[in-house]
Image (cartoon, grey):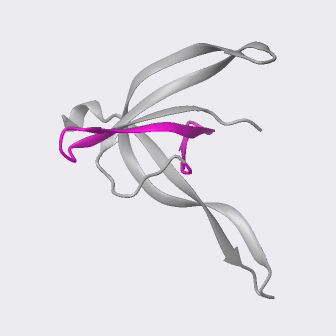
């Protein structure tokens, strides 16, 4: 993986539960890592669902390998958030392709 192709900066976030000053649980997204990435593909995919056809924007980010990423994590890029749909390993811990769709809400 060539460093020159990693021309974007993304933030990987994880949903966490913390406690405020009075001990009340607060659930929020916390930054897990800020990494350099390459955008591999941006498409609009059409899906046929039970209530009809709909479309969602899909994007693939290529990053260097990070341990422990799950589909519960999300990516923040360009002021938008993207839910992870697939985490695919490249080679033997060389890198990761993160397939994500624009988060709703």
**Closer-to-camera residue (90/19):** 90
Residue 79 image-quadrant placement: top right
**Closer-to-camera residue (31/98):** 98
How far from the left and from the top, in percent, is residue 53? 73, 11
Position above or below: 66 against 96: below
> How many labels were placed on the picture?
0
Which quadrant of the figure contains the C terminus?
Answer: top right
Q: Residue at x 54, y 51 (%)?
A: 73
Q: Residue at x 58, y 15 (%)?
A: 45
Residue furthest out toward the front: 50
How far from the left and from the top, in percent, is residue 13? 54, 54
Position above or below: 61 against 74: above
Residue 90 image-quadrant placement: top left
Q: Is residue 96 left or right of residue 73?
A: left
Which quadrant of the figure contains the N terminus?
Answer: top left
Residue furthest out toward the bottom: 22
Q: Is residue 11 left or right of residue 95?
A: right
- Residue 84 lies in the magenta stretch: yes
- Main SS, magenta region, reads strand
The residue segment tinted magenta is: 72-96
Q: Residue at x 44, y 28 (%)?
A: 60
């Amino acid at each position: 993986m060539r460093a020159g192709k990693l021309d974007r900066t993304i933030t990987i976030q994880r949903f966490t539960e913390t406690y405020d000053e009075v001990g009340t649980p607060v659930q929020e997204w916390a930054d897990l890592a800020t990494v350099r990435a390459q955008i591999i593909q941006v498409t609009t995919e059409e899906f046929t669902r039970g209530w009809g056809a709909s479309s969602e924007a899909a994007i693939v980010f290529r990053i260097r390998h990070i341990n422990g990423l799950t589909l519960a994590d999300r990516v923040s890029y360009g002021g938008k958030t993207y839910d992870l749909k697939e985490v695919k390993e490249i080679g033997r811990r060389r890198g990761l392709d993160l397939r994500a769709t624009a988060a709703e809400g």
